[in-house]
Image (spheres, grey):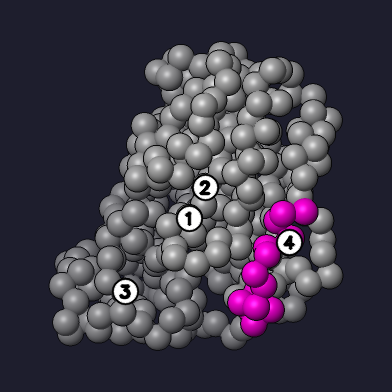
Amino acid sequence: MKVIVIRCGALGDLVYATSVIDALKREYGEDTTIDFVCTPGSAKLFQNDPRINKIFNLKHKKIPLFFSKEKREIVKYSKQHPYDILINFEHGKQFKDLTTAIHAKKKFGSFFDFHGIPDNIIHMVDIIKHVYRNVVSKKVLDSSYPKIIGTRSDDAIKKYAFQEKYIIISPSNSHQKKQRLNYRAWENSKWTKLISLLSKHIQVVVIGNKGEEAFFQELHPYPENVVDLVGKTPLSDLIGVIEGASALVATDTGTAHIASATNTEVFALIGPTPAEQTGPYKTPFNKVHILSVNLECSPCYKTERMKQCRDNICMKQISTEMVYNSIKSAKLW
């Protein structure tokens, strides 16, 4: 069985889609070949994943097939190695020419068998599962959850010389560098205070992307019991680091989704975004704590109300004490 899956977007978007991988393997056998079309940055998620056969990087999604070398290469490969199944998780018109041209016996998703999402299906993971519901049995579908594979957690812990127990702090998010108010952000002073409080009880590991060092300088100096891994881990190692942690604390961002997909306890600070739709996904195997003050105006993400907000009160009103007490009550040390 040969399958090609299309999911282009941010890191969290690709994590959502990973539930399809084990679902396909369980339905059609471990020898099922799975190829993915995704953006170059997100594709690093699969760097150490033995379940994925081939990755097609699609950097310029909006370029029509006729002018896109990347898209033509995918179609050419599918002509030489036809697929049994194509699963398209994208709904933008820029993917229609590609999905139509790819050689596959059966095609699922937007432009093919898709008739909308029932009102009772809210979270993006469940929406993803609804797209491929006709590809696998209901039993397999119901028991499939996002899962990612990187460096083994034991190897990551040894490589970075962590203590037996540690908590990860992930203060940044994908909107950090945008030239406007970062509505998902929590105040730096509160991150600093939280790091100080936690480091008295357990080792704290601070993570962030390469190129974000200037942002993290505002959180310095760190207490003694803190490991600074900002910009120092490839994504495959970061997965192992997160998997081996006692917990991860973050805003609504990709690392929170990685934590939920590796069954690491996650504390997600959420204000403007709809947690029930895009927050870390809850499964029978993980623990997800949504920390929010639940203001009447929330969620407001990508609405006129958010554009008019100049104070980001839904994040500002999440206190350090609220976050610290939630973590403390989890008895992680």
The N terminus is located in which quarter? bottom left
Q: On the image, numbered disc 2 is attached to which residue?
A: 172
Magenta highlight range? 303-317
User: Mark 2 or mark 3, which is nearer the start of the sequence?
Assistant: 3
| Circle 3 SS class | loop
Query: Which residue type does callout 2 highlight?
Result: Ser
Query: Which residue type does callout 3 highlight?
Result: Lys
Q: On the image, numbered disc 1 is attached to which residue?
A: 176
Q: Is residue 297 visible?
A: yes
Q: Are marks 2 and 1 in contact (CB under 8 Å)?
A: yes
- Residue 63, placed above or below residue 32: below
Separation (CA) of disc 1 from disc 4:
18 Å
Residue 127 location (% of width, % of height): 62, 69
Q: On the image, numbered disc 3 is attached to which residue?
A: 61
| Circle 1 SS class | loop
Q: On the image, numbered disc 4 is attached to which residue?
A: 313
